[in-house]
Amino acid sequence: SVTGVQTCALPISEPEVGDDAIEQWVTLAAQDIAGYFGGFPPERAVVFVLVEDGRGIHEGTALGNGGAGVIVRVGREVTGKALASDWILTHEMVHLSMPGLARKHRWLEEGLATYLEPIARAQAGRLAPEEVWAEWYVGMQKGQPAPGDEVLDGTERWGRIYWGGAAFWLMAEVAIHDETNGAKSLRDCLRAVANKGGTIENRWSVRKFLETCDAGVGERIVVRLYEEVASEAVEIDLEGLFERLGVTKQFAGVRLDDEAPEARVRRAILMPTGRL
């Protein structure tokens, strides 16, 4: 259910597409997240839409610590097509669905939002699998450590925070599928966190977050991966990972190979059930 999500339009000028289109945009983003989690994790959330000069969706910010909300800025000339293809609001709503962590773990928060946003939209039928995997194939390379680069915990580098974090969650996803023989997925991990009150309204330690996540799959997987990559500048074998999943770079986009060793895992990630 997304009945607890309220929209407040705070216009500098009126959007040309009309208020109904803005309302529908917010509803679709909330439905993306509700579909993934089996319900919208915060009991209540408020979306403040600031309508200003310009076009497009300009930026969004998730708010927590006692209440769940998003502030998002849109241009007066924003089109219905731009709203329908937007990823920003879904990204911010992922943030509402996990607890606030210490700043040094920002890569876990932004990485999860970067990873989960296209999954939620693809599972809702709003994004093609080829688009998801093409974006990840290119984007996750930006999260690899450069020579002399800092570790993930405490990093301030954009690529490490967003795409290094996203690569971590992809590794966690694949490991959960592998180690539970497809019986569990990252969805089970994150639903366990949400069911324990782990939303943006509350601040948790990273240990509580990851251990609650692992409790949802019944194996010590996410904590172990965190210990392997958080405090060392580890280069992930992304080429090997994508090859096993059956994702091959083409001149334009990627080719998805259903004969690859872990093609079933790749397909399961974007399935509405999240299971093999």
Image (tube, grey):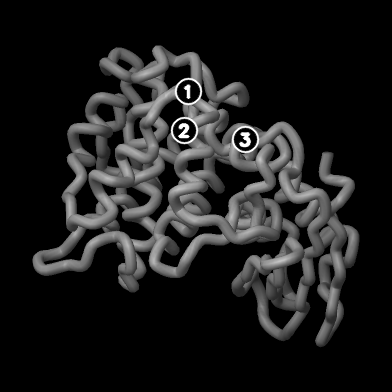
Q: Along the horizontal axis of the image, is 80 left or right of 146? A: right
**Distance of label 3 from label 2 (alpha carbons):** 11 Å
Q: Nearer the viewer, residue 111 or 229?
A: 229
- Tally the marks: 3
Disc 2 marks a residue whose amino acid type is Asp
Q: Are marks 3 and 2 in contact (CB under 8 Å)?
A: no
Name the foreground residue: 227 vs 19: 227
CB atoms of marks 3 and 1 within 8 Å: no
For the point 32% across and 46% down, which residue is it? 226
Which mark sits nearer the N-terminus, 3 or 1? 3
Seen in the image, is 70 located left or right of residue 60?
A: right
Q: Quick one: label 3 or label 2, which is nearer the N terminus?
A: 3
Q: In the rendered view, tell whether residue 60 sits above or below residue 170.
A: below
**Residue 231 appears in which quarter of the rendering?**
bottom left
Q: Is residue 124 left or right of residue 172?
A: right
Q: What residue type is labelled 1?
A: Gly
Query: Mark 2 highlights which residue?
Result: 214
Q: Where is residue 57 in the image (x, y as percent from the top left)?
A: 64, 69
Amino acid type of disc 3? Arg
Q: Mark 1 points at which residue?
A: 218
Left or right, residue 108 beside residue 121:
left
Mark 3 highlights which residue? 191
In the picture shown, does residue 125 fall above or below 20?
above
